[in-house]
Image: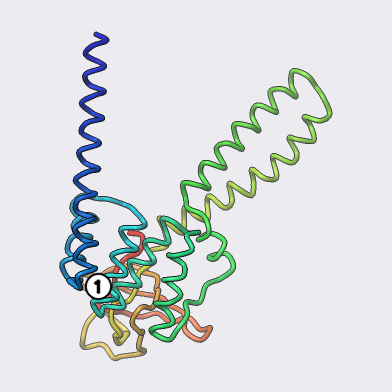
Amino acid sequence: MKKFILGVFIFAYAGFCFAVNTYRAQIDNAERNFKEGKFSKSIEIYESLIKVEKIEDPYIYYNLSNAYYRNGDVGKAILNIERALRLAPRDKEIKNNMQFLYSVIGHNQERTIKDIFLKHFTLNEITIVTSVLLIFFLCIVSLFIIKKLPIFKHLIVVLTLFLFLCAFALSLKGCQEFMLKEAVVLYSVNVRSGPGENNPEISTVPEGKLVNIIFRSGDWVNIKFKSSGKSFAGWIRANDIGSVNE
């Protein structure tokens, strides 16, 4: 039995190493094509790693963003740097590239203080901190019940406050990740009053603009975005945007 378990472990580990080496070879190939100026081929490899192999790595998105930019597709470059930032929100290189790309198209994203705070942490990080605090809180409550020491009572009050703040942040982050569908406009497009070419144009949304998807209707999406401090809503074609967190 022990030999069987050891064999399964070795087989699983070997499979993992093989997968890592396979992906490493593909990444090396993509990087080589990028250096040789074959940006379309580099994009193809990175897109395959994301869509086919289902790899969620911020630096894959970062490299893909660079390849799209060098290939002249700024909208998709911004889309992928936003995806990278969602996975590694405090990475300086990713943040610097994002600022550079927005400067290229000549506009900055308007974010609230809440958005800035929540985008500084990942959902996993907030979940882990909240879980650890909850476990620590339960341990302190148990000790207070047993020992009745005043210090435990004070700790309970402090932990309750921090636990409430973390739980509140967790709920906001969860809503931001699962309820608020963010997308990047890939090309400068006209916003219409309804889902269809026959509806009048009411505004224009520039390339690289971060918008919220309200709902979809066939090949059209209803979006909401801010410009000059004002909120706008309207319809654009679904293939004119790329989802950040769907």
Color encoding of the figure: rainbow
- Image coordinates for residue 141, horizontal then vertical, percent: 70, 27
Residue 194 vertical position relative to residue 116 in the rendered view, above or below: below
Residue 54 can be seen, yes or no: yes
- Image coordinates for residue 209, horizontal then vertical, percent: 38, 78
Please identify the residue farthest to the right as the structure is shown.
150
Is 216 situated left or right of 172 in this image?
Answer: left
Amino acid type of the residue that numbered disc 1 sits on in the rendered structure: Ala
Residue 184 vertical position relative to residue 89 in the rendered view, above or below: below
- Of residues 8 and 122, the one nearer the viewer is 8
Residue 113 image-quadrant placement: bottom right
Residue 192 can be seen, yes or no: no
Please identify the residue farthest to the top as the structure is shown.
1
Q: Residue at x 24, y 72 (%)?
A: 238
Is 155 situated left or right of 46 in this image?
Answer: right
Q: Residue at x 46, y 59 (%)?
A: 176
Q: Looking at the figure, which quarter contains the N terminus?
A: top left
- Of residues 159 and 122, the one nearer the viewer is 122
